[in-house]
Image (spheres, rainbow, N blue to C red):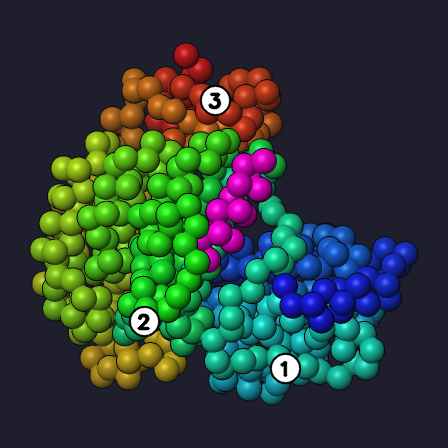
């Protein structure tokens, strides 16, 4: 972390000392954003704010926004309407950060319709939050702290994690792929990877603190260090790590860590060394999240995904032949511009063939500034919804069948805590990320347990300790 920011944390902490101040943080979007919010929380708590879920008692409210789909915008504007009264009543500091703030038209709209905010900050300026806050506390003049150029990878930010068994670790930022529907490359900038040493040290620290499961995060995790290698940039190797495959192998050796997951890889970058590393590393979960987006070669081409339907299916086949017990989950967008009924049937066909463990389904949402938004053959809303429902029906019928197949099997489950809906029960997940609930003593929390699956329900399984 940059020295001046550490100094500013100290300065704000001094101003706030003894005041019993509270903060809330509202996070939208993906796990990367959740991880950023954990960093923001770490910074904010060092400045003597304690967390509350209650917006009305907050002295500082931070929004960490997402812009991948339109509904996140509606949510932000709705919530801003709600917090305006706290600002008026007690001078609550309102800070808005994250991906959406990298979009100029959104910041313009904020200034026009919600001018009561104090700070807007972007994805490249998160670490400067203490400096921005100090400025606000010193002279309450609205701050816009947004950079269009890619930020450097900042190490050493304090972090306040939400969980004490599972942790996510960002391994790379940004994306170079420019899929034609996606806003991410415009708001998160170009790909840049963290150094192997920084990642491995962080994970060793997490293992020491008792964490059992690590999820590696990045917009394109399996191209970890690819840009650096392609551009012959020198970077320090550490414990033999110079690629995603070698990173998996190095993390697999860390004592205490029991499970490794990663999201999201890109099918086009799924090289054999990564497939072999997944096969060889006993801690790497065999559920692979492999975003399909569409099953139609024509649509994939316009989406700029750089693979065909057949290449995707061949990749699945190759992994099935190499990795015992491999399962898949995926992301699918319905209603991309120009998608015909025939194209959509291709998507259904891939879903039938792969039989995914889990499908995250999205209705195409136009994003200003992306090529998809400028395409003329947009699909009418009712057709998008009709296709979405057909896909959902297929997916749910497949999941129901798969759930039945679990009954009677033995599954290794990481027990994560008490069930949220029933205090008497514990909950955990299988390697394939299925939720399992069970009756057992609390001392099982944080441990791996072998469970017999005794019954199935749509969104969870029931297990018994053997
Ligand atoms: N509309 C709908 N879904 C989208 N996604 C990304 N951009 C859009 C968009 N414009 C989905 C993709 C991606 C997931 C994180 O969000 O499926 O994998
Ligand atoms: Fe978006 Fe495609 Fe990059 Fe994923 S790979 S972040 S979908 S542009």
Find the magenta span and give its range: 195-208
Quadrant where the image shows the C terminus:
top left
Alpha carbon of mark 3 to alpha carbon of mark 1: how far?
49 Å
Tell which tag, 3 or 1, sits nearer the viewer.
1
Q: Label 3 belongs to which residue?
A: 438
**In which quarter of the view is residue 9 placed?**
bottom right
Give me the residue at 62% from left, 71% from top: 96
Q: In the rendered image of this protein, does residue 115 appear above or below residue 394?
A: below
Q: Viewer-proximal residue, 434 or 170? A: 170
Give x and y (percent) for residue 383. 23, 66
Give x and y (percent) for residue 188. 45, 71
Q: Label 2 belongs to which residue?
A: 231
Relative placement, left or right, of 421 versus 333 is right
Is residue 161 among what the camera can see? yes
**Precedes in sequence: disc 1 or disc 2:** 1
Quadrant where the image shows the N terminus:
bottom right
Label 1 Cα neighbours within 10 Å, binned few <14 / some 14-19 / many ≥20: some
**Precedes in sequence: disc 3 or disc 2:** 2
Relative placement, left or right, of 416 versus 238 is right
Give me the residue at 39% from left, 72% from top: 190
Give x and y (percent) for residue 300. 18, 66
Label 2 Cα neighbours within 10 Å, binned few <14 / some 14-19 / many ≥20: few
Give me the residue at 18% from left, 73% from top: 302
Q: Contact, CB < 8 Å: mark 3 with mark 2?
A: no
Label 3 sits on a secondary structure element that is: strand
The reply to whether the magenta stretch includes residue 332 is no
Q: Label 1 belongs to which residue?
A: 144
Label 2 sits on a secondary structure element that is: loop
Tell which tag, 3 or 2, sits nearer the viewer.
2
């Amino acid at each position: 972390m940059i020295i001046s920011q550490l100094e500013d944390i100290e300065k704000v902490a001094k101003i706030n000392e003894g005041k019993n101040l509270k903060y809330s943080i509202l996070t939208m979007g993906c796990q990367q954003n959740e991880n950023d919010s954990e960093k923001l929380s770490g910074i904010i708590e060092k400045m003597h704010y304690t967390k509350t879920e209650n917006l009305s008692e907050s002295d500082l409210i931070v929004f960490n926004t997402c812009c991948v789909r339109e509904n996140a915008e509606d949510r932000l504007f709705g919530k801003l309407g709600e917090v305006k009264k706290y600002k008026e009543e007690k001078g609550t500091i309102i800070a808005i950060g994250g991906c959406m703030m990298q979009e100029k038209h959104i910041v313009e709209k904020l200034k026009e319709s919600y001018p009561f905010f104090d700070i807007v900050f972007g994805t490249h300026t998160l670490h400067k939050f203490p400096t921005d806050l100090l400025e606000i506390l010193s002279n309450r003049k609205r701050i816009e702290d947004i950079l269009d150029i890619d930020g450097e990878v900042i190490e050493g930010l304090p972090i306040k994690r939400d969980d004490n068994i599972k942790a996510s670790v960002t391994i790379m930022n940004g994306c170079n792929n420019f899929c034609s529907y996606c806003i991410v490359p415009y708001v998160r900038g170009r790909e840049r990877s963290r150094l192997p040493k920084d990642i491995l040290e962080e994970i060793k620290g997490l293992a020491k603190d008792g964490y059992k499961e690590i999820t590696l995060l990045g917009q394109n995790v399996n191209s970890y260090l690819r840009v650096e290698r392609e551009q012959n940039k020198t970077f320090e190797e550490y414990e033999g790590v110079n690629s995603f495959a070698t990173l998996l192998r190095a993390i697999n050796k860390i004592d205490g860590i029991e499970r490794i997951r990663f999201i999201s890889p890109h099918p086009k970058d799924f090289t054999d060394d990564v497939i072999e590393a997944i096969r060889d590393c006993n801690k790497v979960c065999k559920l692979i999240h492999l975003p399909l987006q569409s099953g139609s070669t024509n649509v994939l081409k316009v989406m700029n995904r750089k693979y065909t339907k057949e290449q995707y299916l061949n990749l699945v086949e190759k992994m099935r032949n190499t990795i015992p017990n491999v399962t898949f989950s995926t992301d699918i967008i319905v209603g991309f511009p120009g998608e015909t009924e025939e194209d959509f049937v291709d998507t259904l066909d891939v879903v039938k063939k792969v039989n995914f463990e889990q499908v995250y389904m999205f209705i195409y949402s136009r994003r200003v500034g992306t090529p998809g938004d400028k395409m003329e053959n947009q699909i009418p809303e009712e057709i998008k919804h009709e296709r979405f429902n057909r896909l959902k029906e297929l997916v749910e019928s497949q999941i129901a069948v798969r759930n039945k197949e679990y009954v009677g099997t033995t599954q290794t489950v990481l027990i994560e805590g008490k069930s949220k809906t029933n205090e008497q029960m514990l909950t955990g997940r299988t390697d394939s990320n299925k939720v399992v609930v069970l009756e057992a003593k609390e001392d099982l929390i944080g441990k791996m347990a072998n469970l017999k699956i005794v019954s199935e329900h749509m969104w969870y399984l029931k297990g018994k300790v053997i």
